[in-house]
Amino acid sequence: MAASGTGAEMVIYRYSRWDATQELFPFHADELMGQLSDQLLAQGDLSAALRSLLQRGVTTPAGNHLSGLQDLLHQLRALRQQLLERYSFESVLSHLDAQLKEVVNKERSGIGKRLEEASSRLEQTPFQDDLSPEAGQQLLQMLADRAHRSYQFLDQLPDDVAGRLRQLQEYEFMDPEAMTQFQRLVQSLKQRVLEAHLRELSSQFPAPDPTQADALKEMLRGLNSLLEDRLNGRPASGFDAFVRKYGALFDGHSPSSVEELAERLRRASARLQSLLKTLEPEQRRQLKEAMDALFRDAELRNALARLAANLHAFRGVEALGQAYPFQGTEPVGLEEALGLMERLQQMDDAERQLRRAYQGGGVADVDGRRLRDVLGEEAVHHLNVLRSLPERLEEAGYIRKVTDRYELTPRGMRRIGQKALQELFALIRKDRFGGHPVPVRGTSGERWDEETKRYDFGDAFEPHLSRTLLNAVERGEGVPFHLKAEDFEVYQRRLASPASTVLMVDLSLSMAMRGNFLAAKKVALALHSLIHSHFPRDLLYVVGFSTYAREVKGEQLPYLTWDELDPYTNIQHGLALARKLLSRQAVGTRQVIMVSDGEPTAHLEAGQLFLQYPPSPRTIRETLREVKRCTSQGIVINTFMLDRRSSLVDFVDQMTRINRGRVFYTTPERLGQYVLVDYFASRRRVLA
């Protein structure tokens, strides 16, 4: 939309409320694969790398972050800590105490008001024919006597909350408003206690009057019988009938077994038990007595106590609920306290699920509804995106599912190698590397940068368009101009010698302990990607060595790990295997690039393995003999050492004098730069 008179474009921003449909954290599968590759290189296991991605989340190049399981756990714990630091449970019963005092004060005020009204009516209203003044005075005196007894009763109420609750339920109120207020308070408290025991089932009995109390006791008898049958190893024959009668009360999710029913009731009961454990001993005693005082029916009290015992026994000695260390100053009442207990236990349940998923249990097992209740809609959105990450990678063709696990596809392996190559090239100045041509120009071979030549008959017709057009313009014919044969300029080509390289990677334990292994692994992947993408005629072999040496295929590189608990370094066996692999190529450059951080501590002699640390002169001698064999076959050994111990330097110097190769003492951070620069440099050969 253009702004008036300016020609400038107006940008209109629209804001809307979050409704869980917006894609807040868009990212491309390539970016996701790049982050996955970092974890895969470090751990050598795709399942572990995927798990790590789910744990840590995803960060886009734009800086947007998709919360991982670790972030959700931190949010949950921070929210719990905020609640614990805000509220104080030192006065849970104070609010109930204040409500009872308010009822008593209203009753006192109502008694006095009723006496005044009665006295006023006697003075202002003529008596009926059948009621003498003496009878009126007698009625007024009876009312005054009752008021006196009520005042005495109220004066003698116990100081504790439970005692007042119990006695006020036996009291005949004179003030209707005070009576209604007290009845509502008692009914609300009863409902909270029932909810603490029965959760959804409590809605069947919102106000247990004598009729409803019978129905409640009947339900509790059936429930206790089901639990006790299962606890005693008997079949719970009445379960189906119980669910048919009360199943509609379970929020549309009827339990499928006695165990599930018990677990749901346990969670409800745990809220009350947590509150009791959080309170100080004296408060706990008063609250228990207050709850007992609410239910004057002994059979009902016993049924609830029996239910609590059965639920406790259903998990053996495991206790119901836990204490919470509240440290704040904001007071809460009993109902608020029960609400906080429920919220904290929802957090605990969500945290247990997230922790299981974090430890490899599967993101699919996290209950999105429960997470929404405690962290909100945005957290559920993050969770759903996390669940979809493997599918997105699979749709992009980077991974595939085989039976019950994922594996890399060829495309995924290439992507990992390309990323490693890009990271290493980014560290090297452009004037330090390039293709590896020889200074013989011609019409075949590899095209080299932007070098061109005038077209001659027989050349491959790959014209450089801009220079061809410029040649025509320079002839000065004006516009329009016409191309002639001599105007055409084609790309120059140089012959490049084929190269065969063996990358020897030390897999001994010291490489991992000193933090060198990951850098060496990235170099192997980068070289593999470089050769397959830029120099398809070249060959690269990878040899891993520790106590023994073995060839590592290209498709195994992403999964390559060090040899755990293997501290020995058999360079001799590695060189022997490298020599065998390179003997298959008769022409071109043949070289070994060895990456290690230690001198030889093992060798093979007459087929027998010899181990010794510190290195034995015998092992040094046999390793140098293998160096001589490589040298006699024209194999150049370039060594990249990640340590500078004097004994190591002495060994490497001897090896270099024999082979005439090069040695670089470097660090893991700069290893890739040196190896790649050397790879390019070693291939510059002049072809006659």
Image: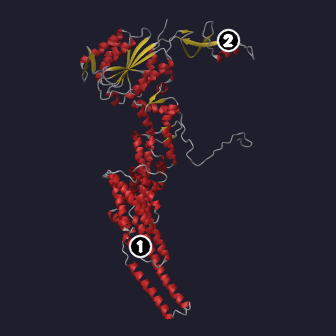
Q: Out of 478 and 613, give the one closest to the viewer.
A: 613
Element marked by disc 1: loop
Q: Position of residue 16 (x, y in %)?
A: 60, 48
Q: On screen, 521 above or below 462?
A: below
Amino acid type, mark 1? Gln
Q: Quadrant of the N terminus?
A: top right
The residue lying at 44 percent from left, 8 percent from top is 587
Position in image of residue 313 (x %, y %)? 32, 54
Of the pair 450 and 134, the residue shown nearer to us:
134
x and y percent of residue 327 in the render? Answer: 39, 58
Q: How is the image coloured?
A: secondary structure
Residue 564 located left or right of residue 58? left
Disc 2 residue type? Answer: Asp
Q: Which mark is residue 487?
A: 2
| Left-right relation of 456 to 503 | right
Residue 395 appears anywhere in the view: yes
Q: Quadrant of residue 56?
A: top left
The residue at which mark 1 appears reads as 169
Q: Is residue 462 left or right of residue 592?
A: right
Circle 2 sits in a helix, a strand or a loop, which is it? helix
Whether 158 is drawn above or below 584: the answer is: below
Q: Is residue 671 visible?
A: no
Residue 481 higher or lower than 138, as above or below: above
